[in-house]
Amino acid sequence: MHREDILIIAYLISSVLFIVGIKNLSAVKTARRGNFLAALGMFLAVTVTLWDQKIIGYELIIAGVLLGALIGSVMAAKVAMTGMPQMVALLNGFGGAASLLVANAEFFHEMHRQGPANYDPAIATAVSIVLSVLIGGVTFTGSLIAFGKLQGIVTEKSVMFPLQHALNALLILIAFSLGIFMAMGNQGIDILASVGLGFFELNILAYTIAGIALVLGVLLVIPIGGADMPVVISLLNSYSGIAAATTGFVLGNTVLIITGSLVGASGIILTQIMCKSMNRSLINVLLGGFGQTPTAAAGEAKEITIKEIGVEEAAMVFESARSVVIVPGYGMAVAQAQHVVRELSEILEKHGSEVRFAIHPVAGRMPGHMNVLLAEANVPYEKLLEMDQINDDFSNTDLALVIGANDVTNPAARHNEASPIYGMPILNVDKAQTVVVIKRSMRSGYAGIDNELYGYDNCLMYFGDAKEAISKLIGEIKANAS
């Protein structure tokens, strides 16, 4: 079998593994298998590409695989589940940086091969290089800012300044304009010289476009507040895929085009789902400046009278409930309470209660954050129900337990047109017979407004760190049963 035949078959197998892997990622139950299949496809594609191009010897390929596996294993073991959004943001950034570096390297390689004075690139290749550099640069620095916001290194609040969108538009226009001249090769340099911009050379054009892309990544993400991080993560994931696909055109690599297209398309679809779940438009996301921490409207500020309970009263409420729906939020993630939540659900089931989990699409800081946390705690997949699956059942539920999840349970989203979250689909926990909310304090959520649910007659506040509060609750229920 010829080398080319082996390469084609390997790339075909890799592509199938990517497609099947992403398909499996669409369900919690098969997500782990999907991740493994996609990783296997990437391993095969990278190894075969290095072998085909004779870039390095077998010894270095094996050494690289072992070193990468070691780094990945350490990261997987060390990174807490609460830090997974930050990890995803970094991985998105690494993908963008790789596309930027590879595209630039290919540009300089081809320019030196032809000679700077004779450089005349193919239009398709030149356009792909420019797009790879632009999208890759934006993804890289944008992901770093997202990581910083999630990690608390950069302020979670929206950072805005006058004419910010105008500046972004101007930089994009300049970058695309310079990209056109760069794609024209020396003819483009001659045109720039004729209008008094003779200082531009091909290498300076490449560096300038890359620099603008890196600056744009920062400017497009700093206006985004912490409330919209799930949208940002999925959007940057899409950007990294698109950058990879355009780099595939630069290199003429089919499997890279397929992989990047899959990631880019799935990221855009997920972004649209996130936008719908947060009552935002995709164009609003793409333009930036969304997710600012709003202030409550004057007509919305009302005094909320809450009913606080202790662990003894909470235990009595749970012991009397025959149907329980648990609504996890970022409060569960911060407290790393997923394991005690699972233990609570098992104890309630032993007492004859039906226990299910209601998952809002944007609960947490990345898509699927709550699903991942609960799956780590071995909560059965079939008990994790999406908002559309369970919302109608709250009216027939004895008890809804809300752990954090401030904004996604706020009834103001249904009726208060002055509220910044008006129109956002929420979980109908207020329709349950009784609602118990576990929070550390009455501090508002990311939207910066009070949750009117807390003042409802059927709502009880059980204050404390989620892990500690639920552990005490479990102990009280066990003591009562003995």
Image (cartoon, rainbow, N blue to C red):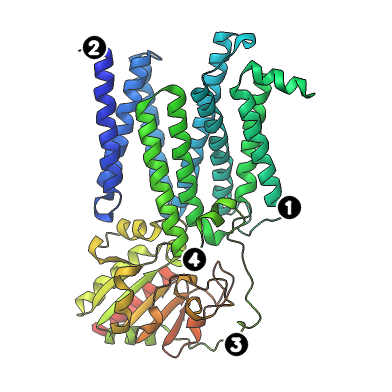
Q: Which residue is mark 3?
A: 303
> Considering the image in quadrants, where does the C terminus appear?
bottom left
CA distance separating discs 2 and 4 = 54 Å
Residue 41 quadrant: top left
Q: Amino acid at mark 3?
A: Glu
* Tag shown at residue 163: 1
Whole-percent x, y for residue 397 in the image: 29, 82
CA distance separating discs 1 and 4 = 25 Å
Is residue 200 something that shows in the picture? no
* Left or right: 419 as drawn, with respect to 401: right
The earlier-in-sequence mark between 1 and 4 is 1
Q: Amino acid at mark 1?
A: Leu
Front position in the image: 262 or 457: 262
Residue 212 quadrant: top right
Image marks 1 and 2: residues in contact by CB distance under 8 Å: no
State the SS at label 4.
loop
- Taking the spot 23% from the left edge, 11% from the top edge, the residue there is 2
CA distance separating discs 1 and 2 = 59 Å
State the SS at label 3.
loop
Disc 2: CA contacts within 10 A as few (<14), some (14-19) or many (>=20): few
State the SS at label 2.
loop
Compared to residue 169, the image places residue 10 above or below, namely above
Q: Amino acid at mark 2?
A: His
> Considering the image in quadrants, where does the N terminus appear?
top left
Front position in the image: 470 or 159: 159
CA distance separating discs 3 and 1 = 37 Å
- Taking the spot 43% from the left edge, 85% from the top edge, the residue there is 459
State the SS at label 1.
loop
CA distance separating discs 3 and 2 = 77 Å
* Tag shown at residue 279: 4
Q: Which residue is mark 2?
A: 2
Is residue 444 something that shows in the picture? yes
